[in-house]
Amino acid sequence: MGNTVVAWLLHSPLHGLLSGSTNLVRYTGRRSGHEYITPTQYARSGDDVVILVGNPDAKTWWRNFANEGDIDVMLQRRWVPMTARAVVGSEDPATIEPLLNVYLKQFPRAGRALGDGTLGSRARDAVMVWCRPR
């Protein structure tokens, strides 16, 4: 129900209530071939969009981007074609640290979910989806 309301708001003229921090991502499941749309919280880095995956062990959508893949991201009521790649901090700390830094500058409280410590230790526990324009 919550996702439906968020999606409706992001498509509506009232999108400004959420558009600065919440978007929709649209992608095709790698196994099912079905189209999925889900809301996420995001931060911008230039033209790039970075998404911190909360509780990644319990979520599966981000796994569609273990290998780079196409994704559409709704920004300001417009679908933007992008390429996404899941970045797992324990596997690629050099890539995830600057992405996480961008995200935590916009959403500092999100760092609590990653525990106390340095950016490096938080990055090891993080999973992010890095979206770049196609």
Image (tube, grey):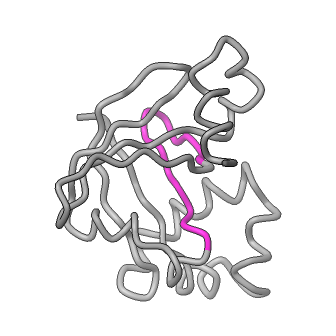
Looking at the rendered structure, the number of numbered marks drawn on it comes to: 0
Displayed quadrant of residue 85: bottom left
- Give the left or right position of residue 39, taking residue 85 as reference: right
Q: Locate residue 31, reporting x and y percent.
A: 17, 67
- Give the left or right position of residue 130, taking residue 17 as reference: left
Q: Locate residue 22, reporting x and y percent.
A: 64, 40
Q: Residue at image x 59%, y 47%?
A: 42
Q: Identify the main secondary structure in magenta.
A: strand
Residue most extreme to the top? 13
Magenta span: 42-54
Q: Is residue 92 above or below residue 50?
A: below
Q: Locate residue 37, reporting x and y percent.
A: 42, 44
Near-viewer residue (81 or 103) = 81
Q: Residue at image x 47%, y 65%?
A: 128
- Give the left or right position of residue 69, taking residue 129 as reference: left
Near-viewer residue (65 or 89) = 65
Q: Residue at image x 37%, y 79%?
A: 92
Near-viewer residue (64 or 50) = 64
